[in-house]
Amino acid sequence: MTETMNIDDYLAQGGVLTSPGNVPARYRGELLRLMGSFVDSELAASAGFAGSINFAPGIKERIAASRITLEKADHAERVLAVMADFGTDTARYQRQHDWAARVARDADLGLTRAGGDMRLSVFHYPIVGWADAVVMNVLMGLATGVQMTELTRVSYAPLAEVFREIAPREARHAALGIEGLDRLVASDEGKAQAKAAVAYWRPRVAVTFGTPRSARFDTQAKFGLRHTPNETLHARWDAAVTETLGPIGLN
């Protein structure tokens, strides 16, 4: 058997890699794609929440939006540092796209990644008010929580460690959103705005889980970069959304 096949078998059996020097070419490509999508999504999310700070109705909400803006940029920087080990020019990478760019509100991108970067499609849509920001943060925060169960187990050990450091802060972002949502639905006007935002964002966040029976999942699973199929992750997210929104009348 070739050296590459031996590494494939090692990874298939749950092995981990620890440095760029022992990473096969195809594995490297999938790993960089995974990291690029995360970095671009975090930078776009940070830019989106930066624009939402001035929508905040009070100081507590403004602090929460500012914290999310800061920490998502920090998370991007941490993963970008791992990409640097593979030769990525991190200074150029950060400035090569307009992370605040958004499509028209009524656009329907599906799984399409517009604009040349690798952000998830949901981060191409604009946030148009405080209720919109809160609901988007809750729904995407719950999705990130589900995805983190995958990311913290990737077979490239330095990246898995970074994701394990990031995961609690991402969970806190979702918790901040839920706190804000509870305050929002306390008024009839806020609840109506939240319902409209759920109708807009829920299908757009759902798309981030990808297609069922994905060929890319099979490739990434072979390399230990994925473990759970898209449809299973989507079902977990959908259950978490139902559990979160049901008690406050937003399902």
Image: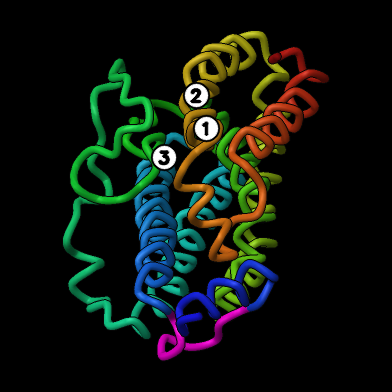
Indicate whether 71 appears above or below 214.
below
Mark found first going from the N terminus, 1 or 2: 1
**Residue at horizontal 66 percent and vertical 9 percent from the top:** 188
Q: Nearer the viewer, mark 3 or mark 2?
A: 2
Task: Count neighbours of disc 1 (C-alpha within 10 A) and say few if under 14, some if 14 to 19, many if 20 or more.
Answer: many
SS under mark 1: helix
Place of residue 76 in the rendered image (x, y in percent of width and height, measured from the top left): 42, 65
Figure check: 100 above or below 231: below
In this figure, which residue is indicated by the disc labeled 2? 201
Disc sitting over residue 52 in the figure: 3
Percent position (x, y) of residue 13? Answer: 69, 70
Q: Amino acid at mark 3?
A: Ser
Mark 1 → mark 2, Cα distance in angstroms: 6 Å
| x 19%, y 55%: residue | 97
Give the mark, 3 or 2, whose residue is nearer the N terminus: 3
Q: Is residue 200 left or right of residue 145?
A: left
Q: Which residue is mark 1?
A: 136
Look at the image and give the residue range highlighted in magenta.
16-23
Q: Residue at x 55, y 31 (%)?
A: 212
Drawn side of residue 203 relative to residue 90, left or right? right
| Circle 2: residue type | Trp
